Image (cartoon, rainbow, N blue to C red):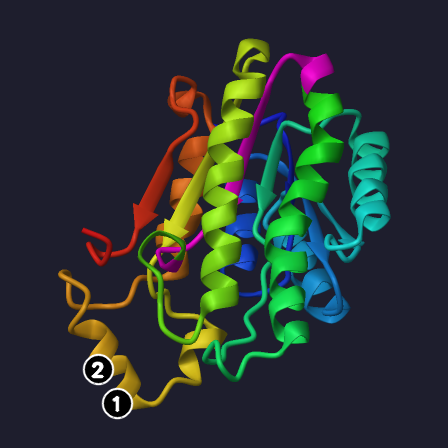
């Protein structure tokens, strides 16, 4: 489905990003696994892909840094000759109630989740415009759609990603580039594993399907949007949330 395609997955060393990298490789894509600090985990993802017969390479880079994001895009383009798929997955949380939230907590989340997405979009666009093709998938969140107490910074960053997605989709559609967003609900990852059973039970009451999602739910949606099967879909936000955002 993705044979011959070159994909970048930011924040690809763990959790949802890891599963996305493995899934895209499983469908035949060459995958650049970006990481900020988890070199060993990123290399583990790459090695797993290679063992299964795929092609992958790890690239260190903090996407919140404009120049580092440029270096990432440039290096991947030089290494593989093209970039067909960009998955803006890198993200962090610094949860706190607004009255207790520090400026640093707000800025860190905005810089990584929102500005990091902008940085990668900015630098990959030139390449995809020349190719007259490309698939961009931005990772938003259901809390960017409905909000969540204690996550003003995170909600703002993910709502911003949605606006950015829709605007860019209009700008590049004429060149055969699609831009879509995925808004995951509560997905079982390392981040949710630390939640208490009481918190998890409360969350489940808000999800019509009555369960958390898994990383494969998100990764398969990414693979679909990256494929030719989704060539007529752009500017959309796919809520993979078990009905939480209904």
As rendered, which of 171 and 202 lies closer to the eye?
171
Which residue extends farthest front? 99
User: Residue at coordinates 51% horizontally, 25% vertically from top-left?
Assistant: 169
Dot 2 falls on a residue whose secondary structure is: helix
Q: Neighbour class for label 1 at 10 Å: few (<14), some, many (≥20)?
A: few
Dot 1 falls on a residue whose secondary structure is: helix
In the rendering, at what x and y percent does residue 176 appear?
55, 13
Classify 231 as above or below 42: above
Classify 216 as above or below 134: below
* Image-quadrant location for residue 73: top right
Pointer 2 with pointer 1, Cβ within 8 A: yes
Residue 104 is left or right of residue 137, and the answer is right
As rendered, which of 241 and 155 lies closer to the eye?
155
User: Residue at coordinates 76% horizontally, 33% vertically from top-left?
Assistant: 123
User: Residue at coordinates 82% horizontally, 41% vertically from top-left?
Assistant: 70
In the rendering, at what x and y percent does residue 170 appear?
50, 20
In the rendering, at what x and y percent does residue 241 appear?
28, 55
Q: Give the magenta part as a residue range.
A: 129-143
Return the residue at label 1.
198
Q: Is residue 30 magenta?
A: no
C-alpha span from label 2 to label 1:
5 Å
Q: Is residue 142 magenta?
A: yes
Q: Is residue 213 visible?
A: yes
Return the residue at label 2.
201
In the rendering, at what x and y percent does residue 209 appear?
15, 61
* Image-quadrant location for residue 132: top right
């Amino acid at each position: 489905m993705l044979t011959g395609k070159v994909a970048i997955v930011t924040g690809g060393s763990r959790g949802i990003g890891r599963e996305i990298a493995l899934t895209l490789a499983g469908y035949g894509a060459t995958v650049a696994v970006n990481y900020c600090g988890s070199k060993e985990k990123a290399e583990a993802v790459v090695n797993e892909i290679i063992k299964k017969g795929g092609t992958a390479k790890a690239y260190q880079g903090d996407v919140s840094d404009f120049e580092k994001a440029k270096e990432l895009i440039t290096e991947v383009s030089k290494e593989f000759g093209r970039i067909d798929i960009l998955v803006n997955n890198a993200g962090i949380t610094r949860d706190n109630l607004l009255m207790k939230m520090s400026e640093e907590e707000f800025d860190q989340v905005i810089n990584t989740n929102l500005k990091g997405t902008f940085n990668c979009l900015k630098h990959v666009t030139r390449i995809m415009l020349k190719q007259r093709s490309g698939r961009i998938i931005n990772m938003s969140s259901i809390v960017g759609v409905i909000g969540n107490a204690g996550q003003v910074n995170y909600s703002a960053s993910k709502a911003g990603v949605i606006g950015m997605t829709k605007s860019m989709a209009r700008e590049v559609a004429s060149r055969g580039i699609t831009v879509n967003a995925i808004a995951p609900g509560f997905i079982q990852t390392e981040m949710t594993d630390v939640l208490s059973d009481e918190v998890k039970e409360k969350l489940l009451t808000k999800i019509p399907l009555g369960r958390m999602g898994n990383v494969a739910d998100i990764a398969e949606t990414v693979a679909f949007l990256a494929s030719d099967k989704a060539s007529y879909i752009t500017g959309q936000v796919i809520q993979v949330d078990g009905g939480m955002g209904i």
